[in-house]
Image: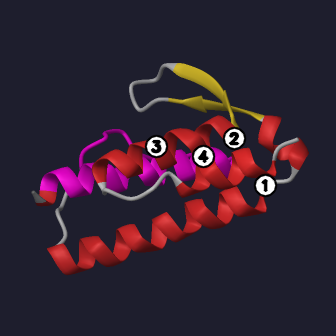
Amino acid sequence: MASILGHVHVVDLIWKAHLEGRPHGSTSRAVEKTMGLEASRDAQAEVDRWYVDCADGLSDDAHDEVVDFRFVDGGTGAMPKATWCCTWSTTRSITADTSPICCIRWVRGRP
């Protein structure tokens, strides 16, 4: 269980770095050292709050801004910031049984 939660956290940190326009420094989607469940919960809650704040703070122009990124295996990709937020939010709703709040907030704010 701790390894699965660690994987989710690492991937969220990787995408967060992409959105912030900085290298993520990760060479794997797995954690090197697992955290205890309480520490894992607290760390995940912090990154979850960051994603919600990020989605809430995106200007109309930033919604469509394309982020270029590099996967841990070296492959490249690109995705608009709003798509990132919707992808994260939808994935979180599946893995954490929460509503896709970031995506809902973004869609409601669009013309």
The residue at the point 53 percent across, 70 percent down is 49
| Numbered tag placed on residue 82 in the rendering | 2
Quarter assignment of residue 107: top right
**Which residue sits at x=26%, y=71%?**
40
- Secondary element at image label 2: helix
Packing grade of label 4 (10 A; few <14, some 14-19, many >=20) is: many
Q: Could you say where residue 82 lies in the image, as x and y percent from the top left?
A: 69, 41
Marks 2 & 1, CB-CB < 8 Å contact = yes
Q: Are marks 4 and 2 in contact (CB under 8 Å)?
A: yes
When the figure is inspected, residue 61 is found, relative to residue 109, above or below; the finding is above
How far apart in space, not on screen, are marks 4 and 3 (Cα)?
8 Å
Q: Nearer the viewer, residue 51 or 29?
A: 51
According to the image, label 4 marks what residue?
85
Give the Cα separation between the discs numbered 4 and 1.
10 Å
Which portion, as a residue range, is magenta?
3-30
Can you identify the residue that label 1 sits on? 58
Q: In front here: 82 or 22?
A: 82
Q: Which residue is mark 3?
A: 90
User: Is residue 51 depicted above or below 107 in this figure?
Assistant: below
Decide: few, some or many residues near mark 2? Use Cα within 10 Å; few <14, some 14-19, many ≥20: many
The x, y position of residue 90, in whole percent, is 46, 43
